Image (cartoon, helix red, strand yellow):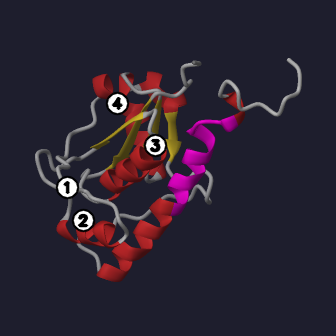
Amino acid sequence: MEEPMISNVMVVCVGNICRSPLGERVLQAGLPGVRVTSAGIGALVGHAADPLAAEVAAEHGISLEGHVARQFTAELGGTQDLILVMEPGHKAEITRLAPALSGRVMLFDQWTGAKGIADPYQRSREFHEAVHGEIAAAAQGWIARLGPRPSSRPGSGSGAGA
């Protein structure tokens, strides 16, 4: 019954209505033992997810229903073990706001290119679809690294002695 090293993850973008809510929900589905939330560095506080982002997500089986945008703060970030940002500039902004968090901030697409995931806000459906695909693929990299390890569960070892 080992506690995971990473138990609180926050996904951050700008407005907290397109990319970060999607990243949050995909990670929640794949990391049931981890508390995953989201925020924005320039959040449209109180807004629901962008309608087109929500529609595209729903077409892929992900609900953004009930999402409410909130502002990233140093205090909020301080409660996180890992902060996943959508663009390199977001990392710079978080580090400016809270230098102590710099070691906890990584790109969401760290394992799939680490170039950043572009903002689909007020862009075409096709752009939203492409961003959805990037987020879904990038999330799998984090799920593989942060998710439960079958060999670490009692009784699931290979039978080799300790």
Part of the protein shown in magenta = 137-150
Q: Nearer the viewer, residue 46 or 36?
A: 36
Judge whether residue 130 can be spotted in this image: yes
Q: CA distance from mark 3 to mark 1?
A: 21 Å
Amino acid type shown at disc 2: Ala
Whether pointer 2 and pointer 1 mark residues with C-beta atoms closer than 8 Å, the reply is yes
Which numbered disc, 4 or 2, marks the residue that appears first in the sequence? 2
Label 1 neighbour load within 10 Å: few <14, some 14-19, many 20+: few
Which numbered disc, 3 or 1, marks the residue that appears first in the sequence? 1
Q: Is residue 132 above or below residue 44?
A: below
Q: Which residue is mark 1?
A: 65
| Quarter of the picture holding the C terminus | top right
Is residue 6 magenta-colored? Answer: no
Determine the secondary structure under disc 3: strand
Q: Which mark is residue 97?
A: 4
Whether pointer 3 and pointer 2 mark residues with C-beta atoms closer than 8 Å, the reply is no
Q: Which mark is residue 54?
A: 2
Amino acid type shown at disc 3: Leu
Q: CA distance from mark 2 to mark 1?
A: 8 Å
Q: Residue at x 47, y 69 (%)?
A: 133
Q: Which residue is mark 3?
A: 84
Label 4 neighbour load within 10 Å: few <14, some 14-19, many 20+: some
